[in-house]
Image (cartoon, coloured by chain):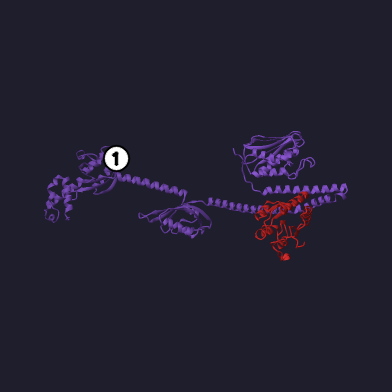
Chain colours: A red, B purple
Amino acid sequence: MNESTEVEILLVEDNPDDLEMTLRALRKANLANHILVARDGAEALDYIFGQGAHAGRKVENAPKLILLDLKLPKIDGKEVLKRIKSDPRVKSIPVVVLTSSNEQSDVLESYHLGVNSYIVKPVNFEGFAAAVQKLGFYWLLLNQPPQS
Amino acid sequence: MSADQPIKAWVREMNHLQPAVDDLAIVPLTDSAAKLTNAQLAELGHAQFAALVECSDDAIISKTLAGEITSWNPGAEKLFGYTAHEAVGQTMLRFIPPERRHEEVDILARIARGETLRHFETVRLRKDGERIDVSVTISPIKDPRGKIIGVSKIARDISERKLADHNFQLLLKEVTDLKAALDEHAIVAITDPKGKINYVNDKFCAISQFARAELLGQDHRLINSGHHPKEFFRELWATIARGKVWRGEIKNRARDGSFYWVDTTIVPFLHADGRPRQYVAIRADITERKKAEEAVRQLNAELESRVAQRTAELEAANHELEAFSYSVSHDLRAPLRAVNGFTRILLEDFSADLPPAARHYLERANLGSQRMGELIDDLLAFSRLSRQPVTRKQVPPAALVKTIWEELKPQWESRHVELRVDPLPDCLADPALLKQVWVNLLANAIKYTRPRELAQVTVGCTQASGQTVYFVRDNGVGFDMQYVDKLFGVFQRLHRMEEFEGTGVGLAIVQRIIHRHGGRIWATAQVGQGATFYFSLAGDNPV
């Protein structure tokens, strides 16, 4: 992805199937123009904090939405969430956990860490696509973020 | 006060008692006494003797060798109850109880031989017939030439002493009996203030297996088991040395090295000044009790460790189950979503290119993955129930049922379904879990009455063995009672998918919740006639 373009959604997803279906759902809703995909937690943090492969990127130039899977290689989703929400520079970025887990412990922990929304990926594709599109619309178009 | 004053006083006393010596009362008995004539001295001696006899508490009697009384002092009057007038000239026989008459003969015979009887204790009769204990000293009266001319007799009332003796004997016997009783029951030892053993009873010897001779002169270190710390005995000695009773349980070692436990009371016997004179240790054998206690303690410890082990195992199992559930919920659903999603995408994006049969199979694959998703969700919900704690609160079931009925409205609003709710007593249950029970039972009632023109659902309760039994009754399709055993099994279904949708987990969840409340659930039904589900919640008697 071209970094000069403003990234609207950071999609953190390791599963290629889920990734493809998410992207398709967003594309169908015309929300896929400014998406950056990170395939693990480390890559996501590199992008968010302008480090590693993304060294030099301005932290202030934040995405409008982060879609975050919980089960991720290297650094898991909760750790990513924790680092985002404990850094004043990026803590106002809306983070939506998009996961297969409907375990109460995961839900509770995510909210404790400051997640903005928690969505369980339905097995049913129609439900899944609808959920992705709805949350895209909500956070990108309806939600009013603070002025940077 | 001069030295002669007491003597003067004594003479004055005599004076009072003996008018015959009135004129002597003023005779000084000091140095001037030496100037008196022999005759005067004899007279004085006689007077003094007479005064002594007169004022003695003892009976002083004289009699002839034949036994005839010749003098009888006031002491005799008091002791025997006869005046001198009554007694003089009589023989002693009337004062002697019939069975002792022989004594007098014997006494007189001995006196005649010149013997003196000292403190001869016997019994005499008073004038009023009462018997009195007396101590008698009888001696011969001799004339200046040594010839025995009479008998002098001094009798003292010793009834009180006798009584005291008797009481003392009784007391002694009581003490001895008590000691015997104590010896029968307890292990007894007595030590001196330094702890040296100077008495042990048979029981002590028996339990310690030491001979008495081995114990006497030793101290209790001989049977020290080494079980108690030094402070234990320090405290014991500090207590009894202060004159206080010590109580406690002591483990001792017998001669053969075996151990025995004694419940011990040590009582210090004190000197008048409060210092311990000796220590009396009274013990009871509590070895068996101690053994039993030890066994109980060991059992408890074993039980605790077993419980701890089981708890750890259970925790590990729960942990594994959680990890398993987590992995099922997370990892099993992702590939299912791929199957479901890509079949759907195929249908959406390439529908025009696909023959109808291909579309049909894709639909089947899509539905299959969807159903598996539902099965996984229900299975997870079911397994989560085992881990969820049950927190009981008072719940009003009728209100709960009505709320749930409203929530289920989408499932019945397009049909004719009547709900009747009888008055229901409150129950003690976990509100969230109990709600799940009612939801599943009511949803089932709605589902399985679907073919009915007018569906009727009744919620009520009965009493069985003091417990409230709630029930949900419907007029639906019912089921065959021969399959009732399968009703509550996970993934068990009594109807085909095409008839009634479902995963077969709902009633398994209901049963698990009821069981976790310690309650019971069962059902009765008839094919085509409807079904009734009953449940109770144990420990639930809010009335």
Check disc 1: other Cα within 10 Å, few if <14, some if 14-19, many if 20+: some
Q: Is residue B285 visible?
A: yes
Please name whichever residue, B224 or B113, is drawn nearer the observer in this view of the structure. B224
Q: Is residue B275 left or right of residue B534?
A: left
Give the residue pinned by disc 1.
B131
| Chain of the residue displaying label 1 | B
On screen, residue B302 above or below B442: below
Quadrant in the picture for the C terminus of chain B = top right
Q: Position of residue B314 (x, y in %)?
A: 66, 52
Q: Position of residue B77 (x, y in %)?
A: 22, 41
On screen, residue A52 above or below B86: below
Q: Position of residue A116 (x, y in %)?
A: 68, 54
Quadrant in the picture for the N terminus of chain B = bottom left
* Residue at the image point whose x is 26% and y is 37% from the top: B128
Q: Is residue B181 left or right of residue B119?
A: right
Please name whichever residue, B258 or B302, is drawn nearer the observer in this view of the structure. B302
Q: Position of residue B287 (x, y in %)?
A: 52, 52
Q: Is residue B268 left or right of residue B82?
A: right
Q: Is residue B191 visible?
A: no
Residue kind at label 1, given as amino acid type: Arg
